[in-house]
């Protein structure tokens, strides 16, 4: 017998996102967020957002940050949801929080922060971000 998590990740692998959401929801109906693998929580929140429930995703990620303060992937997921909602300034703030919580975070997060910073016209904030990105990613930026 497969577990809800088995079904969730199998559905993700097959590109069946609605079924993945059903399986994640089934799993979390019986489980608390506390004590869960943070990446599992992130995956569920991402499915909520991808399946038209961005407010629930943001709420879950906010609760998860209380349990796992500073977990950078929660900030990245919050930023992605906020981008989906067209709330670019808030998304930039979340990406910046991800960088602060984990300065060695993947280069793409720095790129997104720089793009959103340029859009905002905040050229003064760009240089420190670029310097930090170069410190951790060198020529990749």
Image (cartoon, rainbow, N blue to C red):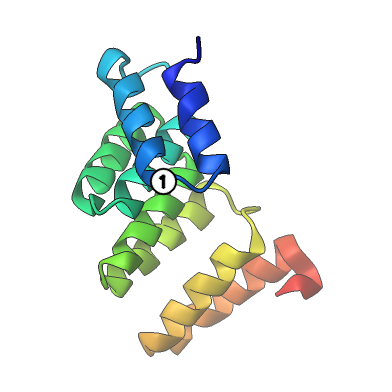
Is 3 situated above or below 12?
Answer: above
Quick one: which residue is furthest to the top in this view? 1
Figure check: 65 above or below 48: above
Q: What is the x, y in percent for residue 20?
A: 41, 37
Tell me the residue at 35%/37% (across/down).
21
Element marked by disc 1: helix
The answer to whether 136 appears left or right of 46 in the picture is right
Q: Mark 1 — residue?
A: 17
User: Can you tell which quarter of the image residue 25 is in?
Assistant: top left
Q: Nearer the viewer, residue 11 or 91?
A: 11
Between 132 and 73, the residue placed more toward the observer is: 73
Coordinates of residue 36 in the picture (x, y in percent): 43, 20
Residue 52 appears in view: yes
State whether residue 134 is above or below residue 51.
below
Give residue 8's position: percent from left, percent from top: 46, 31
Which corner quadrant holds the C terminus? bottom right
**Residue shown at 65% from the left, 73% from the top:** 131
Vertically, is 39 above or below 16? above
Q: Residue at x 35, y 19 (%)?
A: 34
Residue 82 placed where, x, y %? 30, 62
Of 72 and 122, nearer the camera is 72
């Amino acid at each position: 017998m497969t577990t809800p998590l088995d079904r969730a990740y199998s559905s993700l692998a097959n590109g069946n996102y609605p079924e993945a959401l059903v399986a994640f929801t089934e799993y979390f109906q019986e489980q608390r967020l506390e004590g869960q693998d943070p990446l599992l929580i992130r995956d569920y929140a991402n499915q909520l957002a991808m399946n038209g429930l961005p407010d629930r995703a943001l709420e879950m990620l906010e609760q998860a940050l209380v349990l796992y303060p500073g977990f950078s992937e929660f900030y990245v997921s919050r930023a992605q949801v906020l981008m989906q909602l067209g709330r670019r300034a808030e998304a930039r703030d979340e990406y910046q929080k991800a960088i602060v919580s984990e300065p060695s975070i993947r280069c793409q997060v720095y790129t997104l922060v720089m793009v959103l910073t340029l859009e905002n016209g905040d050229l003064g904030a760009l240089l420190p971000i670029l310097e930090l990105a170069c410190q951790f990613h060198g020529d990749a930026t």
